[in-house]
Image (cartoon, rainbow, N blue to C red):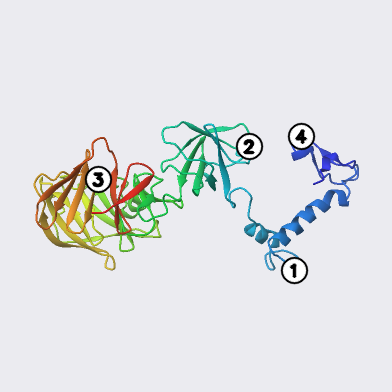
Amino acid sequence: MKVLGNLPVVKDSDVKYPFGSAIQNETDTQDGTPVVREIYNDVLMNIYKLLELTGATPTDTEDNDTTQYQLVEALKKLPNSLNDIEQTLTLTGAVWSIPFNIDFLPNKYVLFARPTDNYVSGTVYTFKGSTGTIYSLTSQTGFNASDEVLIVIDSGTVRVYSLTLLNDMNKTFTIFGQALAFNDSATMHYQEGGNILTDYPSIGNLENVIRVLAGDGTFTVNDIFILKGKILCVVYDPTNITYKFYSFPINDFATASLVTVVSGSIPVGTDNNPYFYCNGENIYVTNKGGSTVNAYEFEVFSFDEIANELNYFSLVNLEATFSRTTNAVIKGDNLYTLIGGDFRQFSISGGTVTNLATYNGVIGNIFNFNGNVYFSSGEVATKWTL
């Protein structure tokens, strides 16, 4: 491409312009930059070529709001040579590299590649592009030569995930942290304070919406469940010392509704710190809905997503050694807890307890996602068959 600064014509020369020059207007006292092929032809040819590459035929009509914007539409269709093609991730010594400049890329830039070698756990790796910039490189999943991998370049670090190893129903990503304890949708969601997050990424400040609706800035969101196409929030009201429930449409983080609790023993003025669990149909509340000090006494409420009601269903007693924990799931007729590596099964119908395993030194979380129970100790979760 010809550069205006290198042409022997009148121009506005200043270091503030890319490549040092800009078009100069003609006035009564100065000449203007001439309209000549050397200046404008490259611009036109590149535009025409862009239309040609994306299959657009010039309409010979002026682009505007009532006709079209053919260049804009062409840009939307144009692939790029960085992350729209599969790159080669090459290992030299302990340095992985890709064949283009990474210095100008934004944080959380993603691309696909195939590595030339196996990732060896425990090895300290670095990552570079075609320049001298060096990032650290880690992989939660590990990967083998010729795997298809996803690379995330972010703030001086590079994360690599093997899509080949994860291409089965036994694993899923949890890249934003701890997933919701119960979520029967097909989209991973996370709770962070009073916010709900997805991998898209998207974020909804549910707590703030609820506070505005209730007219009380002290409300706090304790738990979030997704079931029956709704987001159900357990909310603590410190003024009245009680727990309330609000629901949201799953795709609308800005519209909250107060859920009516029909019967049950959720007290006002007393807080026995109840914990809340979900199985996709019902909400289980420890401490008999919060009315007693006995954690093993559960009140069960069925959630009517149409009427937006929690209806008292039954009272069940677990084995008396049950300890409240957020690290728990309900599957079938059993509630499972993972506390300090001790994995235990409590029968909801029979009140018995079974010690399933002790995982010494293993720290992680269990959660129910899209009909399956998963265990996660990092950014990848593995399905557990219970």
The reply to whether dot 4 and dot 1 touch (C-beta < 8 Å) is no
Count of numbered tags: 4
Looking at the rendered image, the disc whose residue lies closer to the viewer, 3 or 1, is 3
Mark 2 or 3, nearer chain start: 2
Rendered image: mark on residue 130: 2
Residue 77 visible in the current orientation: yes
Earlier in the chain: of badge 2 and badge 4, it is 4
Q: Residue 327's mark? A: 3
Q: From the image, tell me which residue sits under label 1.
A: 59
User: To which residue does mark 4 refer?
Assistant: 15
Q: Residues within 10 Å of mark 2 (few under 14, many from 20)?
A: few
User: Amino acid type of disc 3?
Assistant: Asn
Residue occupying the point 14% across, 51% down:
346
Callout 2–callout 1 Cβ contact below 8 Å: no
Q: Nearer the viewer, residue 381 or 300?
A: 381
Residue type at mark 4 is Val
Q: Quadrant of residue 99?
A: top right
